[in-house]
Image (tube, rainbow, N blue to C red):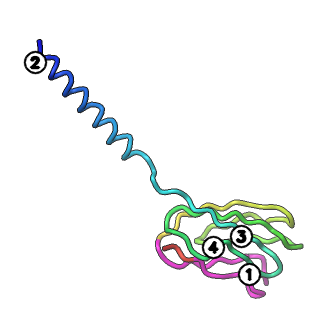
């Protein structure tokens, strides 16, 4: 009977250990970085020029007087009206990424830059 009790105790500890490992492995330990972006005529002001690679969320607020958008890594926000905001989440590998406003003439006027994922 003692032997069975010992075996049950060992199996219980093993089951808890396996559950803990599986639960830990299933968690996403990377946290998204949020970058605030202020759009005006005709520039972007980012809260940070770089962030760890992975999921990066850009919260873009149009503080200007005309509509703007924000494009990075092939994704872009819709046109953002003055006083409004939009959020754009992208997954970035390590490297440098160009960002721009795609409204005709805005990038040429200065609404562009480079963001670095480290």
Question: Which residue shows up at 76% across the image and 80% down it?
Answer: 43
Q: Which residues are magenta?
A: 94-115
Residue at (69, 66) in percent of width and height: 36
25 and 69: which one is in front?
25
In the picture of the structure, the residue carrying the numbered disc 1 is 111
Task: Give the residue at mark 4.
Answer: 48
Asked if labels 1 and 2 touch by Cβ distance under 8 angstroms, the answer is no
Above or below, comparing residue 115 to residue 36 in the picture: below
Does residue 97 show up magenta in the picture? yes
Residue tagged by mark 3?
Answer: 37
| Cα distance between the residues tagged 4 and 3 | 9 Å
Q: Which mark is residue 8?
A: none
Judged left or right of residue 116, residue 7 is: left
**Where residue 113 appears, x then y in whole percent?**
65, 82
Indicate the secondary structure of the residue bearing disc 4. Answer: loop
CA neighbours of label 2 inside 10 A, class few (<14), some (14 to 19), many (20+): few
Q: Residues at badges 3 and 1 in contact (C-beta under 8 Å)?
A: no
Mark 2 or mark 1, which has the lower sequence index?
A: 2
> Closer to the observer: label 2 or label 4?
2
Residue 3's label in the rendered image is: 2
Q: CA distance from mark 4 to mark 1?
A: 16 Å
Q: Is residue 32 above or below residue 5?
A: below
Residue 21, given in percent of the width and then of the height, sits at 32, 42
Q: Please tell me which residue is depicted at 55% across the width and 70% down the height of the picture.
A: 51
Query: Disc 3 on helix, strand or loop?
Result: strand
**Total labels drawn:** 4
Residue plotted at (73% across, 77% down): 44
Q: How far, Cα to Cα, is label 3 from label 2?
A: 65 Å
């Amino acid at each position: 009977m003692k032997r069975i009790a010992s075996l049950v105790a060992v199996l219980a500890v093993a089951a808890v250990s396996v559950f803990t490992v599986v639960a830990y492995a299933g968690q996403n330990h990377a946290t998204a970085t949020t970058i605030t972006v202020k759009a005006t005529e005709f520039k972007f002001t980012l809260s940070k020029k770089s962030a760890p690679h992975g999921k990066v969320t850009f919260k873009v607020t149009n503080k200007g007087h005309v509509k703007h958008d924000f494009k990075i890594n092939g994704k872009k926000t819709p046109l953002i009206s003055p006083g409004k905001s939009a959020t754009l989440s992208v997954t970035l590998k390590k490297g440098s990424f160009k960002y721009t406003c795609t409204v005709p003439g805005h990038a040429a006027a200065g609404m562009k830059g480079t963001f670095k994922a480290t």
